[in-house]
Amino acid sequence: MKKLFLYILPVFFAGAVSAQQTFIAKGKIEFEKKISIHKALDAIVGDDEGEATWIAQLKKSLPAYKNVYFDLYFSGDKTLYQPGREDNAPQKTPDWALGPANDNIIYSDLSKGESISQKTVYEATYLIQDSIRNIKWRITPDTRTIAGLECRKAVGVIMDSVYVIAFYSEQILTTGGPESFSGLPGMILGVAIPRINTTWFATKLELQEVKPEQLVAPKKGKKTDNKTLLTQLNASTKDWGKNGKRNVWCVML
């Protein structure tokens, strides 16, 4: 019984329909990141007829979607997001089709508002130490069930123009989420970003003890911060057109 209370804290609300509602304090969440490969290719096609023909042929050799799995460990005000199990899809997708920064490791200390991220960008590895992004969320009345928990919908904008749809559960006390998303009154269990044709949704939640060694910040990579990295990316991709802008967004999530 004592072990159960390490994970689930009962909280009572006067006047509530139910006398008791359970709140989750620690555990592990598996996220499925789903990338629409075909839509991403369609988005970079210009007016050149030859390029459009080449993209059409390329799509025949690639799956429409690619799933990538991540694990999010959380305990109190700390989270660690890292690559999880391998996708067993029979058709393999080349790394270049996924875009950059697809094996991120992100440590967040929500109480301090700090994060440390390890990201691979064009064969270079960066260690990004910065404050947690402040997103101005607008909470809506819409709901959706994700990984067995009822979630509420919120919308926000990052990087000035990138529209984000998120779903969060107030049953999980930690106010984090996949990648660098946070700032809602509960754990973010679903994210959709139409501009990059990508979604993140929790597939399962495991109530388990989270050991200190499972919440250790990454240490590998060239040290930088978000502002410096963004300046470098914009300079190196300025002649890449639509694809360059999309890649910058993918890295800076």
Image: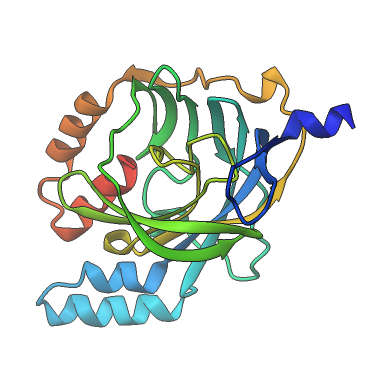
| The C terminus sits in image quarter | top left
Q: Residue 123 placed where, x, y %?
A: 39, 36
Q: Residue 25 placed where, x, y %?
A: 65, 33
Indicate whether 169 appears above or below 106.
Answer: below
Inspect this view and state whether residue 200 appears: no
| The N terminus sits in image quarter | top right
Tell me if 66 is positioned left or right of 130 in this view: right
Residue 230: quadrant of the picture: top left
Q: Residue 238 placed where, x, y %?
A: 11, 46
Tell me if 54 is positioned left or right of 31 in this view: left
Residue 148: quadrant of the picture: bottom right
Tell me if 247 is positioned left or right of 237 in this view: right
Direction front: furthest residue: 15
Inspect this view and state whether residue 119 appears: yes
Q: How is the image coloured?
A: rainbow
The residue at the point 43 percent across, 21 percent down is 221
Tell me if 56 is positioned left or right of 217 in this view: left
Indicate whether 184 appears above or below 246.
Answer: above
The residue at the point 26 percent across, 28 percent down is 226
Looking at the picture, tell me which residue is in the foreground, 109 or 238: 109
Looking at the picture, tell me which residue is in the foreground, 53 or 139: 139
The number of numbered badges drawn on the structure is 0
Indicate whether 223 appears above or below 77.
Answer: above
The residue at the point 29 percent across, 47 percent down is 137
